Every structure is written in C-alpha cells, then in structure tokens.
Amino acid sequence: MAPKGKADSSECSASKKRKAITMEVKVDIIKRSQKGETPTNIGRSLGLSRSTVATIIKDKERIMEHVKGSAPMKATVITKQRSGLIIEMERLLVVWLEEQNQRRILVSLMVIQEKAKRLFEALKDEKGKGSESEEFVASRGWFMRFKARANYHNLKVQGEAASGDEKAASEFPKALAEIIKEEGYSAHQVFNVDETGLFWKHMPDRTYIAKEKSAPGHKASKDRITLLFWGNAAGDFKLKPFLVYQAENPRALKGIWKSQLPVILKANKKAWVTLAVFEDWFINYFVPSVEWYLASKGIPFKVLLVLDNAPGHPAHLGDFNPNVKVVYLPPNTTALLQPMDQGVIASFKAYYLRRTIAMALQATETKKNLTLKDFWKSYNILDAVKNIADSWEEVKQTNMNGVWKNCVLNLWVISMGLRTQFSMLLRMLLP
C-alpha cells in the first residue's frame, strides 16, 4: 500500500495540470449558460473552475463564429493569445514600473494603462510593416491578467458617503413638482449649482509594485482650489467654471487678462466659497448669463435655482432678483438629490485626472531625468486652469441632463398638466 502522503502528492500534481477543453464542451457550456445556468453550477458538473467557465461564456461570440465554418472540433487549451508586440510591451512595462518604484514615484491603474498604450504604439511604429493590424486596448481585464503574470499587487501607501435623510429625499421631488407646475417652468429655466474642492496637484495614493516589495512613503500635495459648476435641467447650458484660488494675482498669470481665462477666477485666502463670494457669483455672473441665454431662445426670464443649504449659500438669495426663485434641498439630502453630485462633478474630476496624468507622463518621458515630483513642482495654476476648462468641456449634455433623475424621478405622474417643454424633459430623464 502506497504511503498516504505520497498518494496525495501525486494526486495534487495531477490536478494542477491544465485541462484540455474541446470545442464541444465549450459550446455545451455556452448553451447551458444561455438557458440560465450559473457558471458555478456548470463548472461543478464538468469539473472546471468557475473562472474557466466564465472565460468561455465571455468569449462566446468568437467561439461560435469559429464553430460555424470549422472542421471537426479538436481539443484546445483555453488560453488568451497575446501577440509578440503585447508580450514585448509588458516586458518594457515591468522595467518601467521597477524604475518608478526605485524613483519613489507612485503609479495608479490609470497611469499604467496610459503608459502601456504608449509603449505599444511606440513598438508598433518601430516594427513598421506587418504590425499595422495589431491592436491593443489597455482594458481593466488586460491589466488584471498582466498584474497576475507579473506578480504585482496594489498597495495603499498613505491615508464621503454621508448618511442621507431618505424620507426627506423621497418627499422633495413632489414638492419640487408642485412648484414647477404652479409656476410653469421649462427644463431650460431650472438650474442647479454646486461647488467642489479640487487638489489640482493630485498624486496617486496607490501604486503597483512587486508583491515581495514595500513602497516608500510620499507627502501628497495639499494645493486645493474650489470650483463652482452650474447648468440647467435641459443640459444645454453650462458656462465657465467659477474658480476660487488663494492668491488674487498668481505669478503664473502675470501678463494675462483674467477676462480672457476659460474660468471665472476669484480669490479667497482659504480658497473657500464664502457668502460674499457666492453673492458676487450670483449677481454678476449667474443672473446676467442666464438672462442672456433665455433671451437667445426666446424664453421669458424666469428661473428656478435648486441649491443645497451649505454655509456659503445665502439663506435669502431669492431676494436679490425677482426673476429668480431659489429652492433649497432639505438638510442631509445633498448626496441623494443634488443633481451636480449625481455624476457631473465625478465625471469632470475623472477627465481632469486623466488629462494631468497624460501631461505628466509626456513630460517625464521627454525629459528622462524629470521625476513626477519635479513635474508637479513646475505644474502651475495656469496649467490647471487650462485642464479644468478642457475637462469641463468634455462633460456631455446627456450627463448634464441625466443627473436630474433623482430630483424629478416622480414627476411623471404628478406633472401631467405641465406644458410640453417640461414633459419632454421627463421623457428624457425616465429610463
């Protein structure tokens, strides 16, 4: 009788061998999945792992296309084929990642994806003929496979979902509907404004390194500004962002007329939106801009402004102009109802981060001795202003329009009597 330990060892060794899967089995898996069977159950019945079954299901279009015109199905080991260019790119990417860790530069997923695409395109240009047809998408799926192959892990190197008043949030849309119905506002006349802080010299707080290594610490930049974004429920009107900076006349803006900037720049020692700053924005920028916009569309100058009850928002803002009615969101409902908080600001910040990271990579690649920290030192408020304006421009009308869903989700039933313009808005917003 063979020793127990030895038998176990041989069984374990056999189980680790890759299992060949025929096309018949793959087709059977796809058909069972289409009938509603879960990958886990399919895997158990066939002696396959759930991830293997999921991979086959995900690749069903290619498999079925292959089956249509193929000869008798042969046993095939399911592996993701990578071209020579991708393999070479990944080797260079590993070297680059090691260099970044040695230079104490933190890299995020977005940075790695951007670098991978640049490396691949450079190799493609270098190879020339024969490589034109090869494509590479630095997707999250590719990265997860690359991370496993290269034995990398994600490491946190340094260190608001507030509980909202759901009852008040559920009642507010009805109250808003009544106001809209009584006053007859159209989608073009309903506005929202919200401010957000932005660390404009942002560095990633996570990096990818080999699992056996540790990462050096770094001190994140605390350079912060406040941005005020605004738009209407129709989603077709958004003007310059309102930017509050610490210095009134930054050195980087010397010789530049502030009126020519793609943002409205104001100063406050702590870069906050105070009552005075907000009143200045409302009287000198919001009212004139909205009046011009409505006049250009032949719509009466009558506006409904939806605001949260932040300390920097005057309680009697509606008294400043008889044509503007201000409605304040209930306390502790901003995260649930504030339109700009439902995706507009998040989209803007994602676009801004992508732009600054691309700029940083371009600079560090052009100048080999330039570190990411050196780049951030040279990155000034004028650079940030340009990236802010371009990122705000990237926010689409569909995004600006769709974020009103929470505020007007229940309006369809209770606002049937509204005029056609607002009914059209509701059709756009409802799923």
Image: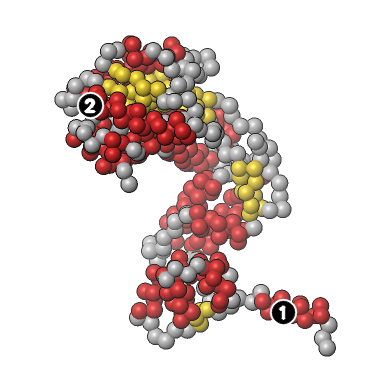
Q: Provide residue 188's location: percent of width, then percent of height.
A: 25, 29
Q: Residue at x 44, y 77 (%)?
A: 27
Q: Of marks 2 and 1, which one's residue comes earlier in the chain?
A: 1
> Quick one: 76 or 250, which is closer to the camera?
76
Q: Secondary structure at mark 2?
A: loop
The color scheme shown is secondary structure
Q: Amino acid at mark 1?
A: Glu
> Quick one: 372 or 130, which is closer to the camera?
372
Q: Quadrant of residue 237?
A: top left
Task: Give neighbour class at mark 1: few <14, some 14-19, many 20+ (Cα, 10 Å).
Answer: few
Q: Amino acid at mark 2?
A: Gly
Q: Provide residue 400's location: percent of width, then percent of height.
A: 34, 36
- Residue lying at the far left in this picture: please name it: 298
Tell me if residue 266 can be seen. Answer: no
> Quick one: 366 or 202, which is closer to the camera?
202
Tell me if residue 84 can be seen. Answer: yes
Q: Is residue 359 left or right of residue 257?
A: right
Q: Residue at x 81, y 78 (%)?
A: 5
Task: Give neighbour class at mark 2: few <14, some 14-19, many 20+ (Cα, 10 Å).
Answer: some
Q: Which disc number belongs to residue 184?
A: 2
Q: Which disc number belongs to residue 11?
A: 1
Cα gap from disc 2 to disc 1, whole angstroms: 76 Å
Q: Residue at x 39, y 74 (%)?
A: 64
